Image (cartoon, rainbow, N blue to C red):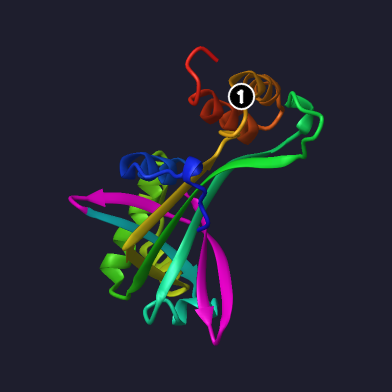
Amino acid sequence: MYTPNNCKFNDRGEMVSFMKRYSFATMVTNIDGKPVATQLPFVVEVTGERLLLSSHFALANEQSGHIEQQNSLIIFSEPHAYISPAHYDKKESVPTWDYVAVHAYGIAKIVSEAEQKMKLLEQMIGFYEPEYHQQWSKLPDKFKHGMLKGIVAFEIEVAELQGQKKLSQNKTADERRRIVEQLQQSDYGVERDLAAYIKELDTGL
């Protein structure tokens, strides 16, 4: 990831929290020289010093056949917003885009054993909607095991993390204040979320 020095985001705990909050990510793997991507929900788990990501592909997705042989890139990217030059003091200004992103790299391990696959599925239920577990537990075993046959579950131990916060750091506090005020009034939740990140740059905003 190209990251200017003033946008670097190195705190591991903060990056993990970001990944958990914005856990629907894009997984990119190289297949015969061509990058192939799938959007997936991830479970993000810290075990001691290990950072683990887990998810699953549809069985028909060819990307699953290549993830154990090489590093994949998982892109966690949200929130973001267009930033108008109308907020800036100088007329000689251009639009930009502010955003927060974390890139995770690692080699996946496919989980084939039925009991472990079920554990990963139930872990995902617990991560995204614990209340659904009561309904899930009452579903017929035949239905649940049929679902297991239709997916390729996997885990990744993250080998490298890179983060970037591009939050108008090159602008003045007054300019950032105007940006925050507009984003806070947005109809879009991701833009209001971005306002909170920019606000953190300056006490009193």
Q: Amino acid at mark 1?
A: Thr
What is the magenta segment's predominant secondary structure?
A: strand
Residue 3, above or below 151: above
Looking at the picture, how far across and down is residue 64, in whole percent? 46, 76
Residue depicted at x 42% and y 74%? 149
Magenta span contains residue 38 = yes
Q: Quadrant of the C terminus?
A: top right
Q: Residue furthest left?
A: 48
Looking at the picture, how far across and down is residue 116, in whole percent? 27, 66
Quick check: can you spot residue 73?
yes
Looking at the picture, how far across and down is residue 104, in whole percent? 41, 58
Residue 86, above or below 203: below
Quick check: can you spot residue 22?
no
- Residue underneath mark 1: 172
Q: Residue furthest right?
A: 91
State the residue in front, 23 or 78: 78
Magenta span contains residue 190 = no
Residue depicted at x 77% and y 32%? 85
Q: How many marks?
A: 1
Residue 97: which quarter of the image?
top right
Residue 156, above or below 29: above
Residue depicted at x 56% and y 33%? 169
- The residue range painted magenta reads 23-49
Looking at the picture, how far across and down is residue 44, in whole percent? 36, 51
Q: Residues within 10 Å of mark 1 (few under 14, many from 20)?
A: few
